[in-house]
Amino acid sequence: MKTISFPDLELSKELEKAITDLGFEEPTPIQALAIPMLIEGHDVIGQAHTGSGKTAAYGLPLLGKMDQNDRRVQALVMCPTRELAIQVSEELAKLGKYLPGIMIIPVYGGQPIERQLVALKKGVQVVIGTPGRIIDHLHRRSLDLSNVRVVVLDEADEMLDMGFRDDIGDILAKTPEKRQTVLFSATMAAPIMELAKKYQKTPKHVKVVHAQLTVPTIEQYYYEMRESDKIEALCRLLDRYNPKLSLVFSNTKRRVDEITNRLNSRGYAAEGLHGDMSQSQRERVMAKFRSGVTDIHIATDVAARGLDIDDIEAVFNFDVPQDPEYYVHRIGRTARAGRSGRSFTFVSGKEVWKLRDIQRYANVRITPDFIPSDQDLEEQRTLQALTKIREAIEKENLDNYRLRAQAMMGEEFTSLDLAAALLFMTDKARPKMEPPSQTPIPRDDERRERNNRPPRRREAYKSPHPASNNRGGQRFSGPRDRRS
């Protein structure tokens, strides 16, 4: 099957430029299937889940159909929750950054309605909202849907579960009969099919089948942290496990370059690989990785295709993959040829929902774990040093070195002094850091239990970003430099 790229989708230059800025190299499976159908004007039923790239799947064609000179509402996206409405609005704004005439507004409960009234009165082309607040605006006559060309029901199964069936019907009744209706749902139960039959015209069905994980020898862990702590977490895990070869995955080309530069600045032998590289650059990077000149390889999912290296001992998901199938392909790079391997996934903010989707759809269990503390790293380095010393004693001819050591011993040094100095030189002194506070992502029952706990003391750290509080993220103090 031919791999589809964004240029193959015949999007506008403005949309392609926004995609390039975001660093995405190729469409996700749901995007590759749905976008051509939506551009052609078909009604579509898409079976997709959170984190699959479905927002861009309907958002790119939707933005491409908007008339920048017409300030009436031309597209309506219904979401079950205000959080999703905000998220969709933010993503569409990024995709439409080079369409200056397109105005996008989210409308939802919990926000003063006066602010929304002012924005609607000025004129907007795209409205994203929850059914309840959309109904409220219709009753106030502050929202006119008579010129709507595209209606999207995002996470339709969730909206039905929340009792919005009648509201959806009332809203669609205010839109033109001749419209494009798009429905995305994680499941295709009977109520969803009834909704599609009632409001769509000969819809096209799009479904992405996910691969199952077939590599049982991989130890899989995840860590919750703030975005700014990921580099430090990566370094600590590299130091803790000291893998022979490591593969670090990122979602964008820009991020690959950033991770590569920051690791190299700390003394790690790292190389990046992404779609902007020429074939000669790619071959040079791969040759260094295979030969062990570099032992850490940072890549996007697209660039990592075709990698066939058996000695990769660890895979790091610096970014949670956009699609569960990508996760399966990523960690499948380790534990080859009967070997064992480890995978480490870094989770930040809303990525927790993507992680849950990965576990559900890929049928895997990913264990919560803690980033190694300073004490853990010191113990590990001491153990590695002792292992090297033991191997030298057992395998090497040390007669000349024994004579030198004996000459140094006497009144000035004892054998214990020499051994301690040897360990110190092998271990290499590093700056002391406060161990990070660490909390794995709580399960649902743990969340309920925590609701009954007393509030935290004021001395505890509080993020300057309210939305990121209570996520259990870690804080790290000070950089770590492998060169010291």
Image (tube, grey):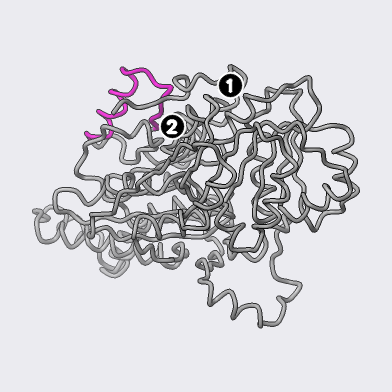
Left or right, 358 with respect to 423, comes to right
Residue 28 point in image, percent of width and height: 44, 37
Q: Is residue 46 above or below residue 459?
A: above
Q: Is 81 in the magenta?
A: no
Q: Residue at x 53, y 77 (%)?
A: 445
The amino acid on which the numbered mark 2 sits, given as a three-letter code, is Ala
Quadrant holding the N terminus = top left
Please state the extent of the stretch shown in magenta in the rendering. Answer: 272-291
Q: Which residue is more in the foreground, 88 or 177?
A: 177
Left or right, 117 with respect to 457, comes to right
Q: Is residue 8 above or below residue 403?
A: above
Callout 2: helix, strand or loop?
A: helix
Q: Which residue is more in the foreground, 211 or 329?
A: 211
Q: Which residue is more in the foreground, 306 or 314?
A: 306
Residue 407 point in image, percent of width and height: 21, 59
The amino acid on which the numbered mark 1 sits, given as a three-letter code, is Lys
Please name the residue that numbered disc 1 is placed on: 17
Residue 273 point in image, percent of width and height: 38, 30
Left or right, 105 with respect to 438, comes to right
Q: Residue at x 87, y 43 (%)?
A: 142
Disc number lying in front (1 or 2): 2
Distance between mark 1 and mark 2 Cα atoms: 18 Å
Q: Residue at x 66, y 28 (%)?
A: 96
Please name the residue that numbered disc 2 is placed on: 32
Packing grade of label 2 (10 A; few <14, some 14-19, many >=20) is some
Left or right, 51 with respect to 379, comes to right
Prevailing secondary structure class for the magenta stretch in the rendered image: helix
Q: Is residue 180 above or below residue 235?
A: above
Q: Is 278 in the magenta?
A: yes
